[in-house]
Amino acid sequence: MIHNDIVEVPDDASRSRKRTKNCIGVGRPALENIINTLNERGEFDDVGHHGKIQKNGTTMTRSQARDLRRKTHKHTEIKPEERTERVVLKPYGSEGPSAGKSQVDTFAMDYANVKFDNSGDSDSDSEPEIDPNAPFKLYANEIFKNLKEREIRYLPRPDYMGEVQLDITHNMRSILVDWLVEVCLEYKLCEQTFYLAADYIDRMLSVIPVNRSKLQLVGITAMLVAAKYEEIYPPSIDDFVFITDNTYTKEEVIGMETRLLTALHFFLTVPTPLEFLERLVDISGLTKSTVLLAKFLCELVVQEPCYLVFSPSLIACSAICLSLYTNRYADIWPAVLEISSGYRKSDIKICVAEIHKAYWRASQSDKLKAVRDKYATEKYDCVSTIQCPQLLY
């Protein structure tokens, strides 16, 4: 049975419009099935005119039928003793054996002691204590292995200074890197931004000859790209133009940015010594002074020509080894570092010697002092003032 009645329906703007109400129509055949089903269940017997419902021989409106169903509906009340109590997840401990746990089980235990409160009290000040690094610890070994594989693909050409670049020297590059350290301090940039900028510079200079008058332009452009990649609020192009005392224009920086990204083939995610250093420090649990000294040695060696020869992971391992030796540790290359890094003590011997030479020259010279002045502050425990050992092991 089809009824086409005109019904007044107020909208949100208190205006009325007319629409045709099709209880059962060609476009909505499912309503007929719904009404038949409700008839079989005894919900209502028939739908009459003007929205009337006949229920068990009694005619009532839809709102009256709805109120009747609400009154006759039975609610199940949960008894107080059946209410859900606060549940506390406990880690594997003395209650059960810990042997035979899988790697996923170990990862799940990092989220132990999380409390679930079903009481509905949203004013509680207590929050679950969850290790934010827990999701990464499960894949730490795989990430470290992937970084070691990728670092070989993005190494700069170690002999580009004599083969590709004919107008610049290693000394010019050292001056540029020392100045970039000051730029990072001026704009409070991350340490990773500095390492990325140095990598972008070396990789570009490995393929494109640059005039010495444009070397600083390459440096600020690499720092601009690295800041865009790493920083939340990177400095603007105008900031980098200002830091060069307006030696270059904004258009020149944009043009060099295009050349830089083209030379790098837009491969900006590269491993740096800082990433390997932080991973090894997290495993070995070194003291703060040892870690800061290792970071100082890593930044110091970026200025040196040997930085182009050794891989980032080898530089990080060598810096840690020399830091342990400088702080007079009995075991300067523990077994945990050897296993985690994949380098034996004999593998890092040459790199340690090169970093030691750079460390010794820096302590005896008054030039290129940006890294030493940075780590001579209280923030870094004045580790750059530690006396460099004259002899190695």
Image (cartoon, helix red, strand yellow):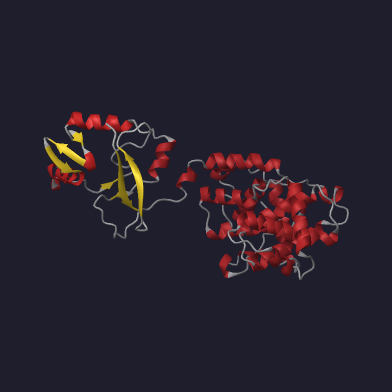
Q: Nearer the viewer, residue 220 or 71?
A: 71
- Residue at horizontal 67 percent and vertical 61 percent from the top: 388
Q: Quadrant of residue 154?
A: top right
Q: Among all residues in the image, which is located at the extreme left? A: 57
On-image quarter of the N terminus: top left
Residue 77 seen? no
- Residue at horizontal 20 percent and vertical 41 percent from the top: 52
Q: In this rendering, is residue 162 above or below 384? A: above
Q: In this rendering, is residue 348 above or below 45? A: below
Residue 273 spot, x, y in % from top left = 64, 50
Q: Quadrant of residue 110?
A: top left
Q: Nearer the viewer, residue 360 or 176?
A: 176
- Residue at horizontal 70 percent and vertical 46 percent from the top: 266
Residue 110 seen? yes
Q: Nearer the viewer, residue 351 or 391?
A: 351
Residue 342 spot, x, y in % from top left = 60, 40
Q: Among all residues in the image, which is located at the extreme right? A: 166
- Residue at horizontal 61 percent and vertical 52 percent from the top: 274
Q: Quadrant of residue 192?
A: bottom right
Residue 213 spot, x, y in % from top left = 84, 62
